[in-house]
Image: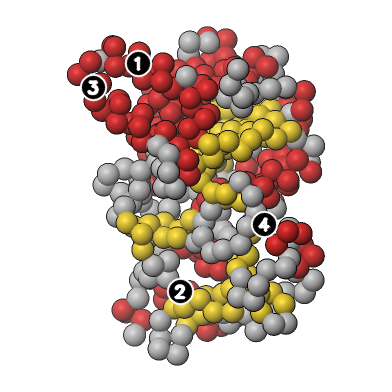
Amino acid sequence: MADEHSPLESEIRRLIAIAGPMPLAEYMRLCLTHPQYGYYMNRDPLGAGGDFITSPEISQMFGELIGLWMAAVWRQMDEPQDVRVVELGPGRGTLMHDALRAAKVVAAFANAIVVHLVEVSPALQQVQERRLEHLGVAVSWYRTLEEVPNGPSIVVANEFIDALPVRQAVKGNDGWHERVVDVAPEGHLCIATARDSLPVFETSMPRALRDAPLGAIYEWRTDDFALELGRRMRKDGAALIIDYGHERSGLGDTLQAVAEHSFADPLRVPGRADLTAHVDFEALAQCAESMGARIYGPIRQRDLFLRLGIEQRAAALKASAPQKAADIEIALSRLLAGGARGMGELFKAIAIAAPELGSLPGFEPPS
């Protein structure tokens, strides 16, 4: 019965009844950004009281080092007097708050900044406004990167791309078929396979994956975001993207749901869990590079922050606040942790920049 479902599930079932099975990317988009019932639209999902914790919430060191990274890049850009500092998916505004505070050590850069935040959630925008209002920096909000004015820009995105809708196809005897969300005969939502195969799909795949076995799943995002980022950065700017994913394009289903700090079923209670999928850094880099931008990385988050001096920053914080030394050390360990699930290993960093900028901070191999 309809009243047994979440409001968004009832809407999804209605749409499937009208138009047939729903592409997985459309399901993911509705779950996250439906105007009324989308996961991000009416709540603050971050922190211990939410569903997950991001790196900026773990330690101020994360945002501080990014702020100093931005200041160094600004100098390489010949110090434009009106530089757009853009953050995609700013969460609670914690990263930007810490970055701007650290950037004040380079007064000329701090004075040149105009902040542009790309945020779809009215609830999170309110949190960001409160977080940043006392810093004395002009801030504007937009729903998409395309809406941000062109010009000299430094873009930062932490755990943003993983939440962009992902498409999936499965290889069958007659070609690749898109994976869709449907209503099973038993009445619950399920993952199904579109009846018709995707025309000439295999020619658009990475060459190394075209001989995939039957039943293999290929996952991809549309190129729009990467192409737009590459177009902007090739002219005058640099972008730093930190997210979890794989360095090389591959096969497999990485869609996952998280609620209350635990993994959940992506099809259960739509709109009440965070949905993400791994970032394909190779595909991202190729799209941006095709627009004329230069690519740095990807490298492990651990390597980036070690090169940016996170251990020295941790030592300084412990010296200034000895009573917090244990907490600072725990945070440092979390950000640098290795292993398959460790943040320092799982999360990667990639930079996309104008070719004339040369080597970027943190992406130079250690001497």
Q: Position of residue 166 (x, y in %)?
A: 58, 60
Measured in 3D between alpha carbons, the distance from the residue under mark 3 to the one under mark 2, in whole angstroms, is 48 Å
Q: Tell me: residue 169, above or below residue 276.
A: below
Residue sitting nearer the eye, 249 or 75: 249
Mark in the foreground, 4 or 2: 4
Which dot marks residue 11? 2
Q: Position of residue 316 (x, y in %)?
A: 35, 13
Which dot marks residue 315? 1
Mark 1 residue type: Ala
Residue sitting nearer the eye, 330 or 235: 330
Mark in the foreground, 4 or 1: 1
Mark in the foreground, 3 or 1: 1
Other residues around mark 1 within 10 Å, as few (<14) / some (14–19) / many (≥20): some
Measured in 3D between alpha carbons, the distance from the residue under mark 4 to the one under mark 1, in whole angstroms, is 43 Å
Is residue 180 visible from the viewing direction of this image? yes
Other residues around mark 3 within 10 Å, as few (<14) / some (14–19) / many (≥20): few
Q: Which residue is mark 3?
A: 324
Measured in 3D between alpha carbons, the distance from the residue under mark 4 to the one under mark 2, in whole angstroms, is 25 Å
Q: Which residue is mark 4?
A: 222
